[in-house]
Image (tube, helix red, strand yellow):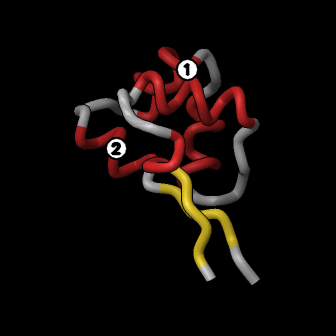
Amino acid sequence: MESLKNRLKDYRTARGLTQADLAVQAQVSRKTINTIENAVFVPSTTLALKLARVLETRVEDLFYLED
């Protein structure tokens, strides 16, 4: 069974952003960023696109399926 994984923390820290910084720029709570990074919460398409825009990357670079 495939599961959705993410590299959000890697991209966020590479840009020198805290979870709070990213949350402000994406207009969500820090807790939302934390739960996405820990694979507890799967973001909506809209939020995934916002995160990719803030981190200047593609959604496919942030999120991927793993067997």
**Residue holding disc 1:** 26
29, 54: nearer the viewer: 54
Residue 30 pos. (x, y %) = 56, 31
Q: From the viewer's perspective, is residue 21 above or below residue 2?
A: above
Q: What SS does tag 2 mark? A: helix
At x 62%, y 35%, the residue is 48
Q: What SS does tag 1 mark? A: helix
Q: From the viewer's perspective, is residue 54 above or below residue 32?
A: above
At x 56%, y 45%, the residue is 34
66, 43: nearer the viewer: 66
**Residue holding disc 2:** 11
Q: From the viewer's perspective, is residue 11 above or below residue 53?
A: below
- Mark 1, other Cα within 10 Å: few <14 / some 14–19 / many ≥20: many
Residue 67 pos. (x, y %) = 62, 83
- Mark 2, other Cα within 10 Å: few <14 / some 14–19 / many ≥20: some
Residue 26 falls left or right of residue 54: right
The quadrant of the rendering that contains the N terminus is bottom right
User: Which amino acid does the dot numbered 1 rest on?
Assistant: Ala
Residue 51 pos. (x, y %) = 52, 30
Q: Quadrant of residue 5?
A: bottom right
Q: What number of labels is visible?
A: 2
At x 38%, y 30%, the residue is 55
Q: From the viewer's perspective, is residue 22 above or below residue 8?
A: above
Q: Counting residues from the N terminus, which is met first, the one under dot 2 or under dot 1?
A: 2
Task: Give the spatial CA distance, label 2 vs label 1.
Answer: 14 Å
* Residue contact at pointers 2 and 1, CB within 8 angstroms: no
User: Which amino acid does the dot numbered 2 rest on?
Assistant: Tyr
At x 44%, y 34%, the residue is 19
